[in-house]
C-alpha cells in the first residue's frame, strides 16, 4: 500500500513537471515564451490545469455506451500504472520485486489497448472510433519490434528480472544474490581481457556491454514513441483531422485521468529504456584507477546515499529521454498511416529480428 | 530552373543526416531561448536585425512603440478649436458631430493666435465609426485635432466609444444660448428702433 501511494505521488509529480516542460520546451523551440502568468515563469500552470479539469462537469454523451465509457479511463490508467510496479527505482527500492518483471510489464501495458478500444467504441463518435482504431493498430504493431528489442536485452542479460538487469549494469554486480561470481568484460567479450567489473560506469551499461544493443535501443525508442502515441507517430490523436482521437468525448476528471495515463506511458517507456539499455540506476561515471568516480556517485546500498544516488541517476536519465521525446515531437512531421506500417513491419521488425539473432551469438561470445 | 538541380537524397545515411540536422535546428532554437527580441519600433535600425531569440511580446507589460505618424485615437484640444466645422464636413463616415453657438463677444485666442468666436456645446467623435483616415487632422486650421499614439481603447459598452470633447456643461451651454438670444433680440430691437427712427425722418 505504501509503495502504491509513494509511486503514485512520484508519478503525479513527474507528470506535472513533464506537462509544464512540454509546454515550455515546445514554446522555446518555436521561439515563443510559453506559460508566463501562473507562478514564477508560469511554473504553476500545469497544477492549475489539473485543478481546472477537476472542477469541470463530467459529461457522458447520451448516445454513449455508458458502462464502457465510464470504465475506459480507469482501465487505461490502471494498465499503465500497474507497469510501474516492477520498476526498480534504486538498488533496494522496487515496489514489487518479481522474477518475471519484464514479461509482466509487456503483458500488463498491452491491456492499455483494450481500454483505448473501449473508450473509442463507448464514445459512440466517429472521430473517437477512428482514433481508437488507429491507436490500437499502431500499438499492437509496434509492440512487436519493441518486444523483440527487449528480448535481445533479456537474452544478453539472461534474466527477466528488472532488478537483476539493473545490477548487471554497474559496479554493484556482485552484490546481487546469485551473481556473486559474475564478471563484466569490456563489450562483454572475455577474450579482450579487460575486466570492467570494478570500473563500472558507462562501460557496463547494456549498450556498452553489448554494443549491438545500441541498435536495439534505437528500435525500442522509436517503437516506444509509437506506443505512447507521441509524434511523429501521433496519427491516433491527429488534432487537425480527428479533433483529439479516442478521448474527444471525455471531459473533467475522466479526461484528466486519460491525460495522466498518456504522460505516465511516456514516463514508463522512458524508464524501461533507461533500465534495459542505459544502465538503470547506475552512475555513468566509471572508476579510473585512483579516481573512484563510480564509487563516489553510487553511495552505499541500504543507506540513504544509495537511495538518493540511485533515484537521481535513474530520474535524470529518464528526463533526458523524455526531453528527447519532446524535441522529436517538435521537430518531425507526422507519418502517414502507410508509412507508419511500412516502418514497423518492413524496417523495424526485420532489423529487430536480426538483432535478436546477433544478440544470441553475442551471448555465446560472452560466456 | 533545370530539373537536375533538385537532387533527392536517398539512402540510410542521408536520412540519418537529415533527421539529425532537424534535431539540431530545434536544439539551436532551444539554446537561444535565453535571448529575447527587444521591443524596438519599426523605425529602429535593429528592427530587422534580430534573427535570434524569443519573439513573443508580453503585450500588456511591454509594447512596441508606434510610429510618430501613425493614425490612432483622435484627440481634440478644445481650447484651440475655433469650431469651424471643417473636420465634420470632410469626415467620410460622418462620425464627428458639432453643434456651435455664437459667442456674444470674443472668447479669446487660440495658441496660434486665431480669434475664437464660437462655443461648441457638442463636439463628439464616435471612435467606433471612425476609420482613422486622418483627413480631419489635415483640414483643421488650428491643428487642434490630432492623432495620439493610443490604440488600446476597447470598451465593453459601445456608447463609451463616443468621445465628448466639449468643455461646456449643459447649463453653461444653455446660458450661452440664452445670452446669444438676448443679444440677438437686443440687436433686433435696436435695428427695429433704428428703422423706425429712419422712417420718421
Ligand atoms: S480620421 Fe477620418 S473617419 Fe476619423 S474622424 Fe477624422 S475624418 Fe472622420
Ligand atoms: S477643424 Fe479643427 S478647429 Fe475646426 S472644428 Fe474641427 S477641430 Fe475645431
Image (spheres, rainbow, N blue to C red):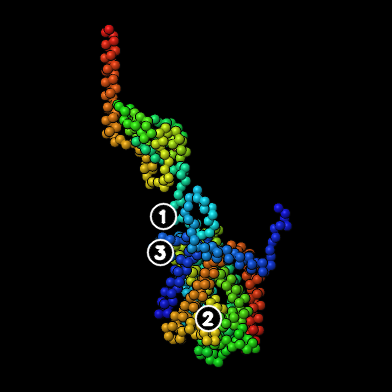
- Residue B78 versus residue A347: which sits nearer the camera? B78
- Residue B95 versus residue B109: which sits nearer the camera? B109
Q: For mark 2, what is the residue?
A: A285
Q: Residue A217 in the image: state x and y as whole percent.
A: 59, 75
Q: Secondary structure at mark 2?
A: loop
Q: Crowding near pointer 1: few (<14 within 10 Å), some, many (20+)?
A: few
Dividing the image into 4 quarters, which one contains the C terminus of chain A? bottom right
Q: Residue A311 in the image: state x and y as whole percent.
A: 46, 79
Whether A284 is drawn above or below B118: the answer is below
The answer to whether dots 2 and 1 both sit on one chain is no
Task: Classify residue A142 as left or right of residue A261.
Answer: right
Q: Secondary structure at mark 1?
A: loop
- Residue A21 versus residue A363: which sits nearer the camera? A21
Dividing the image into 4 quarters, which one contains the N terminus of chain A? bottom left
Contact between marks 1 and 3 (CB within 8 A): the answer is no
Report the chain holding disc 3: A
Q: Crowding near pointer 3: few (<14 within 10 Å), some, many (20+)?
A: few
Q: For mark 1, what is the residue?
A: B61
Q: At 26% across and 14% down in the image, what residue appears? A: B193
Q: Tell me how far mark 3 sits from mark 2, CA to CA.
A: 34 Å
Whether B58 is drawn above or below A362: the answer is above
Q: At 53% across and 59% down in the image, what residue appears? A: B52
The answer to whether dots 3 and 2 both sit on one chain is yes
Q: For mark 3, what is the residue?
A: A40
Amino acid at each position: 500500500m505504501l509503495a502504491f501511494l509513494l509511486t503514485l505521488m512520484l508519478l503525479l509529480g513527474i507528470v506535472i513537471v513533464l506537462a509544464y516542460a512540454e509546454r515550455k520546451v515546445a514554446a522555446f523551440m518555436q521561439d515563443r515564451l510559453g506559460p508566463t502568468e501562473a507562478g514564477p515563469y508560469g511554473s504553476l500552470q500545469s497544477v492549475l490545469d489539473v485543478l481546472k479539469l477537476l472542477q469541470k462537469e463530467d459529461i457522458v454523451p447520451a448516445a454513449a455506451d455508458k458502462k464502457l465509457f465510464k470504465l475506459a479511463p480507469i482501465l487505461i490508467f490502471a494498465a499503465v500504472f500497474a507497469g510501474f510496479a516492477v520498476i526498480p527505482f534504486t538498488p533496494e527500492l522496487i515496489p514489487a520485486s518479481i522474477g518475471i518483471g519484464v514479461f509482466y510489464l509487456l503483458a500488463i501495458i498491452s491491456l492499455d489497448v483494450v481500454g483505448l478500444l473501449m473508450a473509442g467504441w463507448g464514445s459512440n463518435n466517429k472521430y473517437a472510433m477512428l482514433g481508437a482504431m488507429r491507436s490500437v493498430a499502431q500499438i499492437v504493431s509496434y509492440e512487436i519490434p519493441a518486444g523483440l528489442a527487449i528480448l535481445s536485452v533479456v537474452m544478453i542479460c539472461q534474466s527477466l528480472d528488472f532488478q537483476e538487469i539493473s545490477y548487471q549494469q554497474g559496479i554493484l554486480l556482485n552484490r546481487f544474490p546469485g551473481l556473486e561470481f559474475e564478471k563484466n568484460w569490456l563489450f562483454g567479450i572475455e577474450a579482450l581481457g579487460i575486466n570492467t567489473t570494478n570500473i563500472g560506469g558507462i562501460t557496463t551499461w547494456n549498450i556498452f556491454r553489448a554494443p549491438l544493443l545500441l541498435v536495439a535501443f534505437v528500435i525500442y525508442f522509436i517503437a516506444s514513441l509509437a506506443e505512447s502515441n507521441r509524434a511523429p507517430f501521433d496519427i491516433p490523436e491527429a488534432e487537425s483531422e480527428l479533433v483529439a482521437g479516442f478521448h474527444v468525448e471525455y471531459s473533467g476528471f475522466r479526461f484528466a485521468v486519460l491525460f495522466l495515463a498518456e504522460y505516465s506511458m511516456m514516463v514508463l517507456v522512458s524508464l524501461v529504456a533507461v533500465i534495459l539499455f542505459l544502465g538503470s540506476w547506475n552512475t555513468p561515471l566509471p572508476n579510473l584507477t585512483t579516481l573512484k568516480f563510480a564509487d563516489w556517485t553510487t553511495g552505499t546500498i541500504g543507506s540513504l546515499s544509495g537511495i538518493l544516488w540511485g533515484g537521481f541517476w535513474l530520474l535524470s536519465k529518464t528526463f533526458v529521454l523524455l526531453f528527447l521525446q519532446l524535441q522529436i515531437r517538435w521537430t518531425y512531421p507526422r507519418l502517414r498511416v502507410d508509412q507508419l506500417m511500412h516502418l514497423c513491419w518492413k524496417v523495424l521488425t526485420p532489423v529487430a529480428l536480426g538483432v535478436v539473432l546477433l544478440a544470441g551469438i553475442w551471448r555465446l561470445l560472452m560466456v | 530552373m533545370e530539373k537536375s538541380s533538385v537532387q533527392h537524397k536517398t539512402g540510410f545515411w542521408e536520412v540519418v543526416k537529415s533527421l539529425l540536422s532537424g534535431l539540431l535546428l530545434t536544439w539551436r532554437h532551444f539554446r537561444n531561448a535565453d535571448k529575447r527580441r527587444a521591443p524596438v519600433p519599426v523605425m529602429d535600425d535593429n528592427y530587422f536585425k534580430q534573427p535570434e531569440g524569443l519573439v513573443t511580446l508580453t503585450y500588456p507589460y511591454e509594447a512596441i512603440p508606434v510610429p510618430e505618424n501613425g493614425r490612432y485615437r483622435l484627440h481634440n484640444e478644445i481650447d484651440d478649436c475655433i469650431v469651424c466645422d471643417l473636420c465634420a464636413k470632410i469626415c467620410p463616415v460622418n462620425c464627428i458631430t458639432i453643434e456651435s453657438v455664437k459667442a456674444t463677444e470674443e472668447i479669446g485666442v487660440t495658441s496660434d493666435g486665431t480669434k475664437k468666436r464660437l462655443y461648441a456645446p457638442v463636439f463628439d467623435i464616435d471612435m467606433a465609426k471612425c476609420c482613422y483616415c486622418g483627413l480631419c487632422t489635415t483640414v483643421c486650421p488650428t491643428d487642434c485635432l490630432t492623432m495620439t499614439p493610443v490604440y488600446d481603447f476597447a470598451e465593453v459598452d459601445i456608447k463609451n466609444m463616443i468621445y465628448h470633447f466639449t468643455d461646456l456643461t449643459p447649463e453653461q451651454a444653455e446660458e450661452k444660448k440664452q445670452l446669444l438670444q438676448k443679444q440677438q433680440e437686443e440687436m433686433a430691437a435696436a435695428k427695429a428702433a433704428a428703422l423706425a427712427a429712419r422712417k420718421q425722418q
